């Protein structure tokens, strides 16, 4: 775009601008995290990204972790880590106490086993359903009934969506609980009939092993049946990496995580990201630090109106 206007700028210069913008927005990123930690439930997931390393002749794999606030705290934060080790989410979530909705990644297990940590696990039925759908081709007779029962759970959620949390909880207790009991008994019955390492065996084992977390949404009307909202928040990264291919360094990954946090939070708040960046970057340097939260996308939009 610059070239069309006869402006000659190097990629290094433009990349430096992004890093400088991310540095300027760092206090606002911290404020965004404070809002996130006020959520009753946080959804999280991760996806891989390629990262260049001057010590290696090839790109290694880093991770981007989205953290999705609840309805009362409409923010989305991203964190970058060089590996998928537990230390990454452990450091990011330090100080948060509440529900954490995620897949059954083993790195989270230590969080939930330690009561002092204050984290309660919420499972994702979309993940469980995915295992069963993959096994449908090899064992339709057994996986078909299980998928039909899961479909019934989602039909209940369609009715529950417009309700207040109290109404959702009552509806789930009345309709979803009997379906879940039937599904658990059915899976326990067929578990002895399937090979442990077969697709259907893995589907049954995954679901029963995580049963407590998968059924926790029936204990609180503020919880969701799945983590799909968080998964949608990493779609931009998954699609985008086909174009930008890789991060130039670990620091580049951190820069991208900060900037992507504000783009996604703007989109969630119904704010045009370019308008937000244009306004905030032009005045953040002189904005009072004790009023920094006014610039967050979900607060910025009402102020503009």
Image (tube, grey):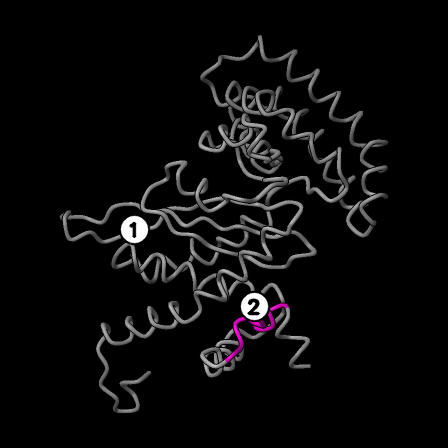
Residue 183 vs residue 171, the one in the foreground: 171
Q: Image height check: is 118 above or below 255?
A: above
Q: Secondary structure at mark 2?
A: helix
Residue 275 vs residue 291, the one in the foreground: 291
Q: Quadrant of residue 157?
A: top right
Residue at the (15%, 53%) spot, across then down: 54
Q: Which residue is tagged 2?
A: 266
In reply to whether residue 267 is colored magenta, the answer given is no
Classified by dominant secondary structure, the portion drawn in magenta counts as helix
Q: Secondary structure at mark 1?
A: strand
Q: Which residue is tagged 1?
A: 50
In reply to whether residue 288 is colored magenta, the answer given is yes
Q: Image height check: is 108 above or below 165?
A: above
Quadrant, the N terminus:
bottom left
Q: Nearer the viewer, mark 2 or mark 1?
A: 2
Crowd tier of the residue under label 2, counting other residues whose Cα lies within 10 Å: few below 14, some 14–19, many 20 or above: many
Residue at the (48%, 14%) spot, across then down: 196
Q: On the rendered structure, is 204 left or right of 261?
A: right
Q: Quadrant of residue 21?
A: bottom left
Residue at the (55%, 30%) spot, across then down: 112
Quadrant, the C terminus:
bottom right
Residue at the (75%, 21%) spot, across then down: 181
Q: On the rendered structure, is 162 left or right of 247?
A: right
> Residue 233 appears at what percent x and percent y?
53, 54
Q: On the rendered structure, is 32 left or right of 149?
A: left
Q: Image height check: is 260 above or below 184?
A: below
Residue 151 vs residue 19, the one in the foreground: 19
User: In this picture, which residue range is highlighted in magenta?
Assistant: 287-298
Q: Earlier in the sequence, mark 2 or mark 1?
A: 1
């Amino acid at each position: 775009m610059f070239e069309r206007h006869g402006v000659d700028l190097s990629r290094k210069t433009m990349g430096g601008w992004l890093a400088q913008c991310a540095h300027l927005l760092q206090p606002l990123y911290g404020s965004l995290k404070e809002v996130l930690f006020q959520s009753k439930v946080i959804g999280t997931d991760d996806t891989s990204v390629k990262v260049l390393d001057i010590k290696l002749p090839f790109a290694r794999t880093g991770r981007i972790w989205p953290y999705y606030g609840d309805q009362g705290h409409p923010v989305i934060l991203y964190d970058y880590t060089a590996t998928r080790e537990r230390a990454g989410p452990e450091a990011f979530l330090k100080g948060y106490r509440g529900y954490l909705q995620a897949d059954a990644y083993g790195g989270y297990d230590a969080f939930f086993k330690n009561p002092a940590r204050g984290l309660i696990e919420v499972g994702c039925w979309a993940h469980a359903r995915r295992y069963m759908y993959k096994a449908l081709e090899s064992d339709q007779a057994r996986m078909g009934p299980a998928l039909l029962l899961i479909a019934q759970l989602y039909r209940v959620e369609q009715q529950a969506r417009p309700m207040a949390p109290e109404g959702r909880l009552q509806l789930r207790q009345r309709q979803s609980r009997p379906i879940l009991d039937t599904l658990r008994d059915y899976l326990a019955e067929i578990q002895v009939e399937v090979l442990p390492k077969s697709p259907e065996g893995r589907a049954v084992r995954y679901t029963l092993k995580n049963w407590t977390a998968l059924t926790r949404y029936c204990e609180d009307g503020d919880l969701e049946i799945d983590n799909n909202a968080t998964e949608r928040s990493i779609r931009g990264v998954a699609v985008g990496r086909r174009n930008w291919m890789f991060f130039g360094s670990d620091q580049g990954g951190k820069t991208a995580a900060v900037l992507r946090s504000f783009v996604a939070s703007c989109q969630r708040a119904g704010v045009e990201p370019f308008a937000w960046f244009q306004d905030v970057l032009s005045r953040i340097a002189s904005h009072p630090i004790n009023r920094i939260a006014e610039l967050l996308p979900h607060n910025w939009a009402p102020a503009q109106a």
